[in-house]
Structure formats: structure tokens, C-alpha cells
Amino acid sequence: MNTKQPTLQVAVIMRKVRIAGAMSRWQTWRWELADVVMNEPAFGTEPRRLRQDESGEHWLHPNFTVELFRDDAEGYYLNATTPAPCWFVLWRMDEEATVSDEPIPRPAAVSVSYHDAGRWLDAQETVEQVPAPPEVVAWFQAFADEHYKIEPKKRKRPDSFKPLTDRFGNPASVSTEKKFGGGEHG
């Protein structure tokens, strides 16, 4: 039995873009996810600036491993079956690493699982997505097809047929009679 997880080595490209309009009064630049590409040995191991001009910058962050796990097959299935399957990238601003006294973004993780993205968002992390190429979608779709079995939906019994209980699980009843209060209003 093969115990090694399927993996892809990828690199993340972040871009710095100029903010236009009224928002530029408070902030002139912002960082965003530009792309996720297959990693190549020529990329090296450290982040580096790819280009810089008056419209912004592009930074390459190499050496991220995207690993598929059997217990997350549903997350891959959910991504693969959407109209726009994608990469999910969790990134943070790195106050320690600066260029010209400005912090730079640091991708922390890359995934193709809806569940990973959901957990990261629940933890209030910055998560962005970019489209995944068809060959990558086929890769995680094949894994999901092999390891995820859709559970048949069980018929939900209407609430009107359920016995009433109080918050402690004891039988309860509903009455339309007034138990407390004043007399007749006239």
C-alpha cells in the first residue's frame, strides 16, 4: 500500500498594486495574490522581486508543497465541482522582512481544499484564490473521485412530527391558555 501523499511543488506570485480613487488618501498601495505556478529549480529557495515599475511590483515565493490527504477528499471534490476551481493561498504581511522600510507579503500555505480555505477564513486569516489550471484540477479531481464517496441524503423528518422537548430534553407541551396576568380587558 502506498502511504506517500500525492504532492505538487508550487510557487506563489504576489503583486503590489497602486490604489486609485478616494481610498488612495489613506493607502497608496495594496498587496494581492497574482498567481500560483509550478515550482522550478531555477526559482531557488528565497522570495525575490521579479519586477518593479511605477504601477507596482511582482514577487515570487517558491517552494510550497500542496499535499492531498484522504480525509480531506470532500474539500477537493467541492473545489473540483465548482464552476471555477482554484488555488487557495493563505498569506500574511511580514513586518520583519521589509523592502525600502515597507513590509512584504509572505504566503504561508497553498491548498486546493475548500475545507482548508474555510478553516483559514474562520481563523480570520487573509485567504485569496486564483484559478487552477485544468491539469491541476484533473489531478485533485482524480484523487477526490478515488477517495470521496458522496453520502446518500437521509430524509429529514418534518419538525411537526418531532416530539416537543424543553432545553433539558424533557417532554414539553404548548398551550394557548393564558396562565398569568391580569383579568379581562374590555
Image (cartoon, helix red, strand yellow):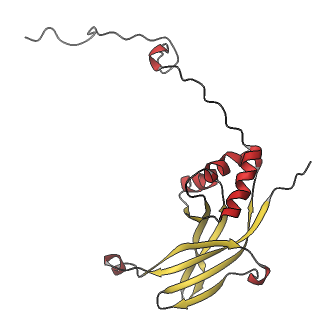
Image point 80% across, 58% down: which residue?
Answer: 6
User: Is any part of residue 119 visible from this angle?
Assistant: yes
Image point 50% across, 85% down: which residue?
Answer: 56
Image point 47% across, 91% down: which residue?
Answer: 54
Residue 8: give x, y in percent of width and height: 76, 65
Q: Residue furthest right?
A: 1
Residue 115: give x, y in percent of width and height: 62, 50
* 180 with respect to 110 (left or right): left
- Towards the viewer: 25 or 130: 130
Image point 48% across, 20% down: which residue?
Answer: 158
In the image, residue 123 sits, relative to residue 161, either above or below, namely below
User: Is any part of residue 100 visible from this angle?
Assistant: no
Name the image quarter holding the C terminus. top left
* 35 with respect to 45 (left or right): left
Q: How many numbered discs sit on the rendered protein?
A: 0
In the image, residue 184 sits, relative to residue 2, either above or below, namely above
